[in-house]
Amino acid sequence: MRDADENEFRLTREVILSGALRDYIRANAPDVPILSDEELEASWRETLAARPGGSAARGGDVWVFGYGSLIWNPAIHFVERRIARLYGYHRRFCLWTHLGRGTPERPGLMLGLEPGGSCVGMAFRIAATAVAEEIGIVWRREMFGGAYRARWCRLATAGGPVDAIAFLIDPAHPRYADRPPEAEMVDALAHAAGPLGTTRAYLDNTLAHLAEYGIRDRPLARLQRLAAREAGGTASPEFRSRRG
């Protein structure tokens, strides 16, 4: 397991804008389909055009729902954030990653939203004047590999309901993790690592930041305990260094 200082990339705003991570994937996995800048822009513009409320809602602020690393590393400029609950979907490790936080020999796992239950996360409000740039950054981060479907969803927040863009897993994607055996998941969570760091630190950071907002996720907490046991009972070095 690599330490945080050994990561080849930190997923910062600058790295996303530079396209460095996407270039890395193209160089190291040329067979992996990657959307072009033009395709990404067409995708986010199509999503914004489908915003609930029709033309009356267009041109205003935009909400984005974060349920994983967006919570603790949004990398976008926003003017407000709220704890939010999305009904009808739950958070699950359902996407294999061969290059982000894993390798082809030992793939890691990433979170996605699947139908059923509910998910508590963070809603970020992007100012209308910054939507094109900030949504462009979100798309470069979340949508370049085609594993997610961007959809408008109604969120419940303490300040009232909001319509937000959420990223749902595409079960037709070749890297979709369709309920793998628990032992296989635990092995990936305990040991997989890639240029963005370890899968375990991704899990640890997500749970730690959920806890800071008083949010509990029992299925993820159980996986964290199992991964810690599999890894020898200690926190991941990357997570420790970032918390220290």
Image: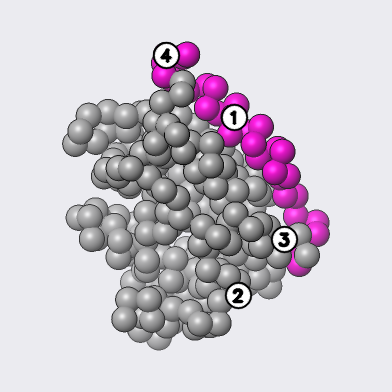
Apparent side of residue 146 relative to residue 26 in the rendered image (left or right): left
Q: Secondary structure at mark 3?
A: helix
Q: Which residue is mark 2?
A: 8
Residue 45 circle label: 1
Residue 125 circle label: none
Nearest to the observer: residue 208 or residue 226: 208
State which tag comes first along the sequence, 1 or 3.
3
Q: What's the magenta region?
A: 28-57
State which tag comes first along the sequence, 4 or 2.
2
Q: Residues within 10 Å of mark 3 (few under 14, many from 20)?
A: few
Residue type at mark 3: give it: Asp
Q: Is residue 45 magenta?
A: yes
Do we see residue 121 in this rendering? yes
Q: Are marks 4 and 3 in contact (CB under 8 Å)?
A: no
Above or below, 200 against 18 in this view is below
Front position among marks 4 and 2: 4
On the image, the x and y values in percent for residue 71 come to 37, 54
Q: Secondary structure at mark 1?
A: helix
Q: Quadrant of the C terminus?
A: bottom left
Q: Is residue 227 magenta?
A: no
Apparent side of residue 207 relative to residue 212 in the rendered image (left or right): right
Q: Which residue is mark 3?
A: 23
Above or below, 135 against 190 in this view is above
Above or below, 218 against 119 in this view is below
Nearest to the observer: residue 93 or residue 33: 33
In 3D space, how far apart are the residues under numbered discs 4 and 2 (Cα atoms)? 44 Å
